[in-house]
Image (spheres, coloured by chain):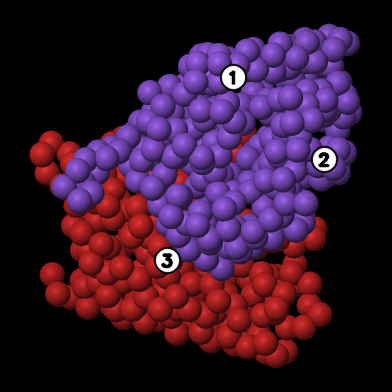
Chain colours: A purple, B red
Amino acid sequence: MNFNEKLINAMKRNESLLCIGLDPDPELMPSGMGVLKFNKAIIDATSDLVCAYKLNLAFYEALDDGIDDLKRTIKYIPDNIPAIADAKRGDIGNTARAYAKAIFTNLGFDATTVNPYLGFDSIEPFIEQWDKGIFILCRTSNPGAADFQSLPFVLKRKQLPLFEIVALRAAQWNKQSNNIGLVMGATYPEELKLIRQNHPNMLLLIPGIGAQGGDLASAVRYGANARGQKAIFSSSRQIIYASRGRDFAEAARQVASSLRDEINYHRSTLTSAR
Amino acid sequence: MNFNEKLINAMKRNESLLCIGLDPDPELMPSGMGVLKFNKAIIDATSDLVCAYKLNLAFYEALDDGIDDLKRTIKYIPDNIPAIADAKRGDIGNTARAYAKAIFTNLGFDATTVNPYLGFDSIEPFIEQWDKGIFILCRTSNPGAADFQSLPFVLKRKQLPLFEIVALRAAQWNKQSNNIGLVMGATYPEELKLIRQNHPNMLLLIPGIGAQGGDLASAVRYGANARGQKAIFSSSRQIIYASRGRDFAEAARQVASSLRDEINYHRSTLTSAR
């Protein structure tokens, strides 16, 4: 089953656009607990509430034996829930090919984030894998996002910010296999609104709700399409570190459940307003 | 010893601006040979000819047990030759911190390449490590580099390509610890010339000579500064896959030696023309 089908099925089955970021940080986890055990408990407690899990490779690369924990976590995620690599890779053609192999073949992810700075040949080896999902960084959720992504560029005598040009190119490249989405931070609702207006059916991966401070109502209103679909809302720290005690998994479930319901409430106001 | 000192000492000791990319590809290596054995033989044959080794993480991540080979290779590189991670990472602040830990603390690299798309807070955790070298992608060597890096940007009513803005910002950020350099592909001599003119003393990491087709004479003329310094010329496939036979290490030494000498010849024409 390809990524898009798996994602849509999980969204329907769990009535959820919520993605949980499994980003292990030993300083925030219950003391003495191993990463794999922690992740398994979170997955057991939340797999009926999410449309996807997102694993940022940095947190595993920063740990001793982290890659082993990463592999085992991906294997543990139920087959009917997609696993997204938050890898943000970007390199020249033959090297991008090696990264695509590492992420899809070796690690077994269903989708990945990629960085557009190196242009088409850095992204092509990923999108050639038509059954995988590719999320191109567009306007990210961090404070420095504006440094380059919002610079005004001149295109056909109009001024457009760089992230809009990235979105335009992504939409063109998407004609090849319809497996491209965009990463749009929830922390910048105006930019999110703009991209959704110009790309009504593009799949958006929207991090930055929760700990990063993005307003959920705006993120859903501007990020989902008119039918309240085509968006994945990702939260990590707010959910998985809801408690540092023995009840961490139960606490994570409660926060995840509330977030899912809040997202669904805001979706319902979208569709009822049509 | 910090990265800059280690690099300059190696440049002087080996009279070399040549960096060898240790990018293992089992399809191009002598058949049946393991990555670690291959890398050790290349290092033994060339460590008196180079100013640095560069290891692209993609090629190790694409292999089973590749990270173990990567760690052992870094340990095997002589202490007086810097090891550069070609990682091109870029992520939001707390995640960038995890990548910096992975690359510098866990793997033990002296320097790394980073991607600027996410802005300052994605680069800050790297440059805070004042004793390490940080190479920010500016104009890369691949065909798709122009897709975004050369888009005209409006700054104070002038039009500048994105890669020039990246270089300007990098120069500002470099005031903090003087540990920033730029990645400039040898395949675009005009862009290289422009950046060197505007940044006469910035350290440039210049890939794309050799298999990627960059002209060495132009790369040295435009990439080195007026004293024939402040540039690292990197080649991988042309050197390490010079032969697939038992003589691969000897063949690699011959190509590396010729490249070093050619680079030095072009440097000498620069300084004698002053």
- Label 1, secondary structure: give it: helix
Q: Which of labels 3 and 1 is toward the front?
A: 1
For label 3, the SS is loop
Mark 3, other Cα within 10 Å: few <14 / some 14–19 / many ≥20 = many
Q: Residue at x 81, y 45 (%)?
A: A71
Q: Mark 2 or mark 1: which is in front?
A: 1
Residue located at (67% from left, 72% from top): B25
Mark count: 3
- Tell me, for residue A80, which label it has, or none: 2
Displayed quadrant of residue B169: top left
Q: Return the chain for callout 1.
A: A
- Location of mark 3 (residue): B142
Vertical order, A223 against B48 (above or below): above
Residue B251 % position (x, y): 59, 87
Where does label 1 land, which residue? A267
Q: Earlier in the sequence, mark 2 or mark 1?
A: 2
**Mark 3 to mark 1: distance in Å?**
42 Å
- Residue A182, how many percent across, how many down? 51, 41
Q: Amino acid at mark 1?
A: Arg
User: Which numbered dot is residue B34?
Assistant: none
A79 vs B58: above or below:
above
* Callout 1 crowding tier (Cα within 10 Å): few <14, some 14–19, many ≥20: many
Mark 3 vs mark 2, foreground winner is: 2
Same chain under badges 3 and 1? The reply is no
Please state which of residues B237 and B223 is positioned toward the viewer in this rendering.
B237
Confirm whether residue B69 shows in the render.
Answer: no
Marks 2, 1 in one chain: yes
Q: Which one is in front, B54 or B98? A: B98
**Contact check, label 3 and label 2, Cβ < 8 Å:** no
Q: Is residue B135 left or right of residue B240?
A: left
Q: Quadrant of the C terminus of chain B?
A: bottom left
Find residue A29 and report its image quarter: top right
